[in-house]
Image (spheres, helix red, strand yellow):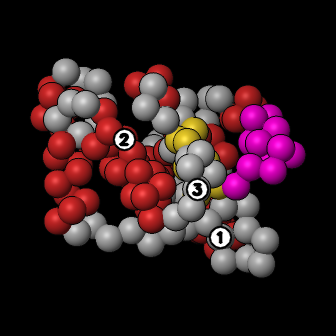
Amino acid sequence: MIFIDTSVFANLIEVNGNSQDRASVLEQFDAFVNSGARFVLPITTIVETGNLIFYAGGDPRPAAERLVGALSAAQEVNPPWTVRAVDWDLGFVAALIDGDSTGSSLVDLISDKRMASGDVAILVERDRFRDETAYTDVRVWSLDSQLQAFG
């Protein structure tokens, strides 16, 4: 199971100014699909991508329409990815503050400019998914080297 990070998703749906790696991401996506990989679109990725579209230059409507199309695709019979509910409860917040599986606190990760809160939230989503399902091989696909190190 592969969790899609914002850096990848922005390339998949072509967000203005955030899709410079689009060709290689599409190639890798096809390779994953052909190998039978399954994808999860984290709630954090959806929120961050909407923010990227909002703040990107140019007309945001085409990218916003692609975002909605991608979210709608998760409702299809054979979706390219699933969107899984996650509770942003006190346990989630505690894991976020602790830096989840990074070994560093959120304060240290942000202060040292190693990782932002959205990246840590994706790790929390991934780890909760792993704990709550039978999947043992659950990775994060990211173009961010810091997040990849924990993915």
Residue placed furthest toward the right: 34
Secondary structure state at the residue bearing disc 1: loop
Name which of mark 2 and mark 1 comes first in the sequence.
Answer: 1
Please state which amino acid type lies under the numbered disc 1: Ala
Please state which amino acid type lies under the numbered disc 2: Asp
Residue occupying image coordinates x 49% and y 29%:
148
Residue 71: image location, x then y, percent? 60, 68
| 73 is higher (above) or lower (below) than 29 | below
Secondary structure state at the residue bearing disc 3: loop
| 107 is higher (above) or lower (below) than 69 | above
Q: Nearer the viewer, residue 20 or 81?
A: 81
Pointer 3 local density, CA inside 10 Å: few below 14, some 14–19, many at least 20: few
Q: Disc 1 designates what residue?
A: 74
Q: Disc 3 designates what residue?
A: 135
Name which of mark 3 and mark 1 comes first in the sequence.
Answer: 1
| 62 is higher (above) or lower (below) than 27 | below
When asked about the image quadrant of residue 68, the answer is: bottom right
Does the magenta-highlighted stretch encompass residue 29? yes
Residue occupying image coordinates x 17% and y 65%:
90
Between the residue at mark 2 and the residue at mark 3, the CA separation in whole angstroms equals 21 Å
Which labelled disc corresponds to residue 60?
none
Q: Which residues are magenta?
A: 26-38
